[in-house]
Image (spheres, rainbow, N blue to C red):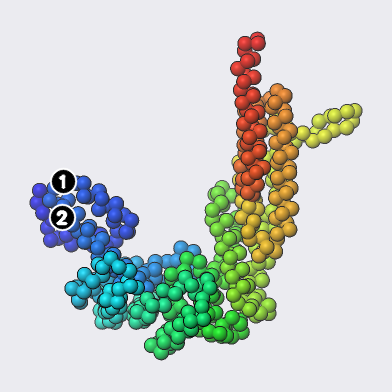
Amino acid sequence: MAELSVAQRAVLAQMLERVPDRVLKTLAGAVAQMPGERAAALSIMLADETIDRRRRAIAFAPLLPMFQRRPDGVDALTFPSGVLPRLWKAASGKEPELLLVLDDYRPIEENPKMRAVADRICVAAAAAVRDTPDIVWPVGGDEAVRARGLDELALCFDLAAMARRGLLNLPDLILRPTGDQLAELRLLIRDCAEITTDGGPRMLEIMFAHLGDASLILRLVVHSSKASAKEGLLSESEMAGFVNRLIAEVEARVTRIASHKPGAKADPGPGLRADIAWCAETLGELDITLQLDPEGIWGKQAREARERINKSLSGTLRSLDKTMDRLMPSKAVKTAGRMTKQAPDLDAEAAPLEAVQAAILQLTLLGALRTAAQVFGCEGLRVQLVQSVTERVTTWVDLVIEAVNAGEAPDQRKSLAMVETLAKCLLLIEATDAARTVRRRAGAAGARASLDEERSPRAA
């Protein structure tokens, strides 16, 4: 089979630039098993691309997360992912002989030579952005956005070497920083401000890209200045943008939480729980880290966000009793004379789909509030509802199991299916012990019912 032509190599090289890292590894393994000269040539190209990306990850490590959007959706300084491979090619191509230094097995923080080469490539990247912007970031789309992006990209690479040093202390800075580490951070912010007027916030922007939990940036903002913990001073500083973005995302998620309505077709599950937890963690971090003025802009916004969440969740959860009635149909039965009591209506039709969906939504909300209710101010309502639901379900299930064991259930399979649905409901509010008990009793009743069914033909 003929070798790959120049044109084919060029096309394949462009395609490989767009392949995600995880796909590249899988593709390399698959091509390695294929016979033929073209497969061998492609395998070599894949190996070269893998090495090149590893070098790029080392050299561009301080800014690498900025070439993709934050997973949590919080607004942040980012650049198009397509710019990354073009910028790397422009920066690394000037002195290709230095790239071999990046193949050292030692960590870069323990290898001064590797760190020097990586910083040199970042300086070359900043120059490439300024000298060849059309190659690094081709013209297209909103020209104003592109121009601002090019300016930000060059300025960020100007700070890359300093960011590489500062990021070494990032884990400690968000946990228990020492006095020396705080001094180093403030010195770093001051040095960045000498390079460019907004160098301090830009350095925190770079660090922000490395934080999985967006609210932790508040700790860095406060550590960056002794006066930053006070809302009045911080709101007027250049660091205020980080707090504004977090509050904006809280408000967006509060709106999303309130948009979930009982009976919705989509399963609210993971997304709803994630939004509630994220809002609780962020609002809690604001309370702990900043001295919010109750009458200040941020203090009012945080209070309003809590009130909106509390109102939305309370309104939905207060109708939970009626929703559970539809999952546990009951009827009045005579006990003695005119006296009656409520008992499970095992002749009733199964609950409609919308009733089940409404219950899932409300119980998911209730379960999601377990660690967040105190922040939102509805812990009392949560505890009351969890106890009420657990007691109602276990009482109703006990009566159903007694009916099944006594042979009084018209359709034993249907009755036990209703019990299983309620066990899943208990799991949604994390009443795991009660759910386990319900399932154990239902399993025993089901085994007994099956045995009775096997014996009945013989008795006949």
Tell me the amino acid under the disc marked 1.
Pro
Determine contact: label 1, label 2, CB under 8 Å. Answer: no
Find residue 69 and report its horizontal and vertical position in percent: 42, 66
Q: Which mark is residue 41?
A: 2
Judging depth in this view, the residue of 204 and 276 nearest the camera is: 204
Judging depth in this view, the residue of 458 and 318 nearest the camera is: 458
Q: Which mark is residue 120?
A: none
Up-down: is 210 above or below 444? below
Up-down: is 391 above or below 146? above
Residue at 48% over, 79% down: 181
* Sequence-wise first label, 1 or 2: 1
Find residue 414 and report its horizontal and vertical position in percent: 63, 30
- Residue matched to label 1: 35
Asked where in the image residue 309 lies, by quadrant, the reply is bottom right
Residue at 13% over, 55% down: 4
- Is residue 79 in view? no
Badge 1 local density, few (<14 within 10 Å), some, or many (20+)? few
Q: Locate residue 379 relative to residue 17 in the image: left or right.
A: right
Asked where in the image residue 449 lies, by quadrant, the reply is top right
Tell me the amino acid under the disc marked 2.
Ala
Q: How many marks?
A: 2
